[in-house]
Image: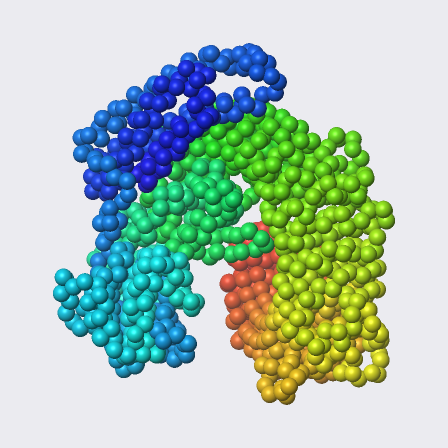
Amino acid sequence: MAEAIAFDLALELITKLSSRALSQVGMWWNLKHDLDDLKRTVRTIKAVLLDAEEKSVTDNLVKVWLEELKDVLYDADDLLDDFSTEALRKDLMGGNKLTKEVRLFFSSSNQFAYGLKMGRKIKTIKARLFSIASEAKVFNLVERHRPMETSFMTKKRQQTHSFVPKDKIIGRDDDKAALLKLVLEFESEETVYIIPIVGFGGLGKTALAQFVYNDEMVKNHFELMMWVCVSDVFDVKIIVENIIKSATGKSPDQNLEMDQLQKQLREKFGGKKYLLVLDDIWNEKWEKWVSLKELLVGGAKGSRIIVTTRSLGVAKITSKCQPYVLKGLPDNDAWSLFKEIAFEQRSADSTDSGFVEMGKLILERCCGVPLVIRTIAGTLSFKETKSEWLSFKDNELARISQNEGEILPTLKLSYDHLSSHLKHCFAYCRLYPKDHEIDVQELVQFWIAQGFVKQLNPSQSLVEIGFGYFKDLVERSFFQEVEEYGFEDMTCKMHDLMHDLAESVAGMESSIVDSNKIASDVGEKCRHISIKPSLIPLFKGKKLRTLLHFQYELSQDFSYETWDLIIANCRCLRVLKLNSIGIHKISPSICKLKHLRYLDLTYNPGLKILPESICKIQNLLALELDSCHILKELPKKIEKLVNLTHLSCSFCWELTHMPRGIGKLTSLETLSTFVVDKDGSHGGADLSELRLLNNLRGELRIANLGFVKNAKEKFKAANLKEKQHLRSLHLQWNADEDDDEKSLEDLQPHPNLKEFYIAEWRGDAKSPSWLSFLTNLVYMTIIQGNFKQIPSFVQFPCLKGLTIGDCTKLEYMDDNSPKGSQGEPQSFFPSLKHLSLFNCPNMKSWWRTTKPIDDDSNEDDTTVMGTSTMGFPCLSSLLIKNCPLTSMPLYPSLDEDLMLSNTSSRPLKQTIKMNINAKAPLTSTSSLPLSKLKSFDVRKIEGLDTHTLDECLQHLTSLKRLTIRDCKEADLEGMQWEPLKNLSHLEIDNIPMLVSLPIGLQHLVQLKRLKIHNCNGLRSLFPVFQHLTFLEEFEVEDCKELELSGAGIQIFQDHTSLHSLRLQNIPKCRHLPDWLQHLTNLQRLYLVNLPNLTSLLDEMRCLTSLEYLHIREIPQLEERCRKDIGADWQKIAHIPNIVLYQ
């Protein structure tokens, strides 16, 4: 990657050397001539770098030259950063010109001496660069301003073709079937339907396309079939020539112009239904694609084009349809492919357990990627003995991805096509451990701190641009498993092979230091490391720009002496990540890290205070302090951090105030928390300091609002309505007393807000008028509010989540009647997915005008106003707890969770009887209300008798998890359990009428976990328990009348699936049941508070799979299970893990 870095560094140096700040520096210290010379030298070198980049692929001397150049350019960049920092420090000094000059002269580092020192350094850099520039002449490097069309990165891939032997494709039958549907059956409005197949190199996109292309049904379906390998040079004329060649079997005349070629193409298509495969497209320019697509629309309706690409960006411009994203092979298919190749010459070995065991361990390294499996299996097929396989597994396997063989060059094609800034960004990810879950927001901050993110458009923030870079890399399959949560919060992972590629291209510049040897071996030229904290003292490099560590558990490996080492040896640091490291104090000398852009001190719960000297790090862009739980305050002079854009201090519960002057940091884009000074004793900032912070993005939590003096004035001064980039706003009062003087009206946010959270509001009971205008809200939460009413969110188009809790005065949710919404059901909570209502004891009805109905009312369920049609159209999960709601909109579409606790059963009854489609009768179980529900938790519901619960369960055909708790009127024995064919988890708690397990449970063939708690009427588990042969986990607790013994021990011989058993507080358990010995696959056994159990079974020896035995609160067993000498020790001596608690 040296060539890409060198070019970018040269560009950056020229920009800095041309800046006004450096020009001033040159005049201050009489260095202008030296700086101009340096700029000329760098420009001369930059001119030949693109040529050097191409030559370095085949010429190792040029590659070494580039490495040396990169090292000098890095040093030059550090030096210029020194100058810029000094210029910034000079500008920030207060006072008049004379005062500044005096201060500078008598500063701790005398300015004259500083100028001399810098002059010597710059002359040294000049000499090194001049020497390197002279060497360039030896390589005959020529000036180039852009890469040549036939550069080193083009035409590496061998031409693909449509033929593939049937036996070469393993494990893609499902993928083929899915694509065949798109190719043969899908009805498209477009004449020519385009199907993109996307996935990173080596997954088998081309092979899959070949698989489909050669299918007999496909051949019979199309009149004309063509295959063209496009690769990286997207030349429309060449592609058209190749299409004609594929269709006719001969190449067109090379002298034909484009018009003549178009005519030939149209004549060949001639209204025929055709299939065209365009394999390996890289072009992401829409105009180029359109110029080709316009030539391909002449076929008959039903024509298809299959595009294979590594880039989602290509997929988007080529087709409107969802791309088919290819994944790795399933384990069984991966093994089939491996076995077929590795044992090709020696079929007998494929049954030899030694070869098989080693083969499967080796296969794990292949990650399901067919190309990798083929390469490694092919290598093994030439190794004859087990010792050779073992040697390969233990030695060569770790290095195979580094060899210039079949794997990395294929993946590197994608890398070669990246722009230089994306190459930087990708290679930097080498610092993450393999399979690490990458925090994307943090990664973008790293990129910004290193200067990889270029701000070409001032209206775009660096974070936005950085996320754009990440998206570009995702679309090219460099990252996978991208998960979004919240707003702009995202995680991802890198495929192991992509990590190998990052390691390969990063070279010596980056390293993961996780052993003493590596710490000692890493060279001086290493610029970026992630390291175990305990190894920092062993690391000798002095040019580091990044020091990271990735630990999940709190470490205590970091001493105050380690601080001194970092500060003494790592003066060039841009990124320093010291989270979760047990820091209690930070060295005041941290200010010497003047290049630092990113400092992460999160999850250091013992950190109480930050040194004021931290405010001298004027280049600092991001300061991360989340979860420093006892941090009392931020530095008083934080306003001096003029470049700070990111200040995060969430979960710093002891923060008492914000420092005055924070409002001057107008570049701030992240301020996660603003804490109001409760009594003014700390001299903290007031809300008016938020007035000019209008670039804030992401989340802002304002705490202690209940203590604001002159609230109307200060609330307005916060100027929340101008903060258009904020996505989430949390307003927390934290005051115990009611305060009718304060009004929410003056805290109006911008309508762009996506998430709004109000907690502990103690002001007037009326909600603010602007709340109804926040129509872009996606999530709304009101907790512990004084509200008697809230505005209707019924027609908020984007609202997905609504949570109302601990609002003791709230009486209803909607001021309208149910009839008011009946005319337009599509506008009733059109996007709401999740609704939670809890601890609102006065909310008896959803609507103000609906008369509450008692649970024991004889009124017919379907006569309640509006219930025949009023329902949430797309609600997925619903929680109602401690809210006596007797009338509310119904919820037939729930497909995730339903949790009802201490509430009315009436809405549930109405929902069950509801017809989802009012215009047509119910025709199948799939259209029954709640038929898609996955989890149902019902607790303490008055009026929920056996009949109602049974009627409800008949609908829950998709249910996987069921909890029935505190339902005193329910007799589970009288219910029909057969419809719950998908149930895997059942929990029964405090059901007094339960005497034995319901006979219907034996129909639950998917049941994996069964928990029975607090059922004091339960006497026996039999005869039903013997039929639950698929059960994996069983626990029974607090059942005073339960007898565990069964009718016969032979009944348990089928219980081979049970691997966890918990028996707790069962007074009648005087000895363990005999059937226990037949649970031969039992792995974990928990025996807790069995007061009458005096000994263990002799047959405990039969439990050969038992790995963990937990005995607690059974004092009479403690002595018997004492190691080596206890009476029962020999019965359990074979168990690896035994835990005894008193």
Which quarter of the image is occupied by the N terminus? top left
Q: Is residue 46 visible?
A: yes
- The foreground one among 193 and 72 is 193
Does 87 sit above or below residue 553?
A: above
Residue at the (57%, 39%) spot, across then down: 646
Residue at the (47%, 46%) spot, across then down: 466
Q: Would residue 762 appear left or right of 750 to someone viewing this image? A: right
Does 578 sit above or below residue 350?
A: above
- The foreground one among 291 and 390 is 291
- The foreground one among 968 and 451 is 451
- Residue 275 locus on image (x, y percent): 29, 74
Q: Would residue 256 appear left or right of 205 to someone viewing this image? A: left
- Residue 1131 locus on image (x, y percent): 57, 60
Question: In which quarter of the view is residue 901 placed?
Answer: bottom right
Does 1077 sit above or below residue 97?
A: below
Q: Would residue 194 appear left or right of 830 to someone viewing this image? A: left
Residue at the (50%, 63%) spot, across then down: 1104
Give the colouring mode of the picture: rainbow
- Residue 904 locus on image (x, y percent): 78, 72
- The foreground one among 210 and 627 is 210
- Residue 957 locus on image (x, y percent): 60, 79
Residue at the (46%, 57%) spot, across then down: 481
